[in-house]
């Protein structure tokens, strides 16, 4: 998730400084990322074409929590990384898609959306079902999405095989910094339907690094005074809970969503 405005990519900013893959070795953000960003700067938060490995924890949004997280990141970030510490606001629109009534994608924990008109797909990391945090591989290139699904989203939409089930506009404050030697980002989201939620996120270098990334995210959450067991619904789950109760109930039965506050 980017620390750039989705509306425009500042020409004065280098590709590497704007890449969310800053937590990975320099050079892992491919040339294709820059090309894709010409269509949507949000792509700059992503990494190799195989998809980034996101580890995240949601929390209840409050000014006190935001301030505490900012203080922790400010104190733990090294002077050498001070140039990459930042806080920015952006606005974007997500449209989520699935097979109408059968919900075959979301029932298998796969989340297909268009963000600012660009197709994206989140799929669970193998073995992540027993994890305490959410862990997904995020695909943002059409060839990767087609390979994962076996079909092209645009063609399926045109043929009526999938349909939109959620349209969410978000205002996000993003804070990026460093904690315990790992690059992390704090997202503070306010959705257009009146819901607010926060998220601590980092990227794992590979699947072997996911467990360590989870520990680092939980350590930051605990340092900020968050309860490890606290896990409010995300924006989409809350939207389904409020506006698509049948779909929400189906995902509860499938074990994709769990009971939250």
Image (cartoon, rainbow, N blue to C red):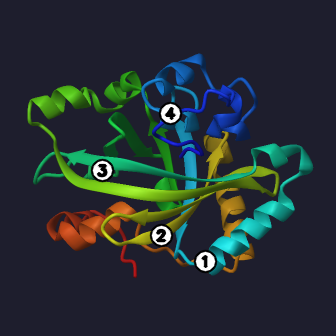
Name the spot of residue 138 as percent of width and height, x first.
Answer: 47, 40
Does residue 40 show up?
yes
Name the spot of residue 50 as percent of width and height, x first.
Answer: 51, 28
Does residue 226 show up?
no
The CA span between labels 3 and 4 is 29 Å
The CA span between labels 4 and 1 is 28 Å
Name the spot of residue 7 as percent of width and height, x first.
Answer: 45, 39
Q: Which mark is residue 63?
A: 1
In what element is the residue under mark 4?
helix
Q: Residues within 10 Å of mark 1 (few under 14, many from 20)?
A: few
Provide the residue designation for mark 4: 41
Q: Residues within 10 Å of mark 4 (few under 14, many from 20)?
A: many
Q: Residues within 10 Å of mark 2 (few under 14, many from 20)?
A: many
Provide the residue designation for mark 2: 197
The CA span between labels 3 and 2 is 24 Å
What residue is shown at x 55% (from left), y 48% (from top)? 54
The quarter of the picture where the C terminus appears is bottom left
Q: Are marks 4 and 1 in contact (CB under 8 Å)?
A: no
What residue is shown at x 48% (from left), y 63% (from top)? 189
Q: Which mark is residue 108?
A: 3
In what element is the residue under mark 2?
strand
Residue lying at the far right of the rendered structure: 79
Q: Nearer the viewer, mark 3 or mark 1?
A: 1
Q: Nearer the viewer, mark 2 or mark 1?
A: 1
């Amino acid at each position: 998730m980017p620390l750039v405005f989705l509306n425009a990519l500042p020409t004065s900013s280098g590709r590497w400084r704007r890449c969310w893959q800053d937590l990975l070795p320099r050079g892992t953000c491919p040339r294709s990322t820059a090309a894709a960003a010409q269509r949507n700067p949000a792509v700059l938060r992503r990494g190799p074409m195989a998809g980034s490995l996101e580890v995240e924890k949601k929390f209840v949004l409050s000014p006190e929590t935001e301030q505490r997280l900012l203080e922790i990141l400010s104190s733990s970030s090294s002077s050498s990384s001070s140039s990459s510490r930042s806080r920015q606001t952006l606005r974007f629109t997500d449209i989520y898609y699935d097979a109408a009534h059968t919900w075959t994608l979301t029932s298998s924990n796969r989340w297909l959306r268009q963000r600012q008109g660009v197709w994206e797909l989140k799929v669970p990391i193998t073995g992540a079902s027993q994890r305490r945090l959410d862990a997904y591989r995020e695909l943002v290139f059409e060839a990767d999405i087609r390979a994962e699904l076996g079909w092209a989203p645009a063609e399926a939409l045109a043929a009526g095989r999938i349909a939109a089930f959620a349209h969410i506009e978000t205002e996000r404050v993003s804070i990026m910094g460093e904690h315990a030697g790992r690059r992390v980002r704090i997202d503070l989201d306010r959705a257009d339907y009146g819901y607010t939620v926060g998220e601590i996120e980092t990227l794992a270098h590979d699947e072997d690094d996911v467990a360590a990334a989870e520990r680092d995210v939980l350590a930051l959450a605990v340092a900020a005074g968050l309860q490890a067991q606290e896990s409010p619904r995300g924006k989409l789950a809350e939207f389904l809970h409020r506006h698509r109760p049948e779909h929400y109930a189906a995902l509860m039965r499938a074990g994709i969503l769990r009971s939250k506050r």
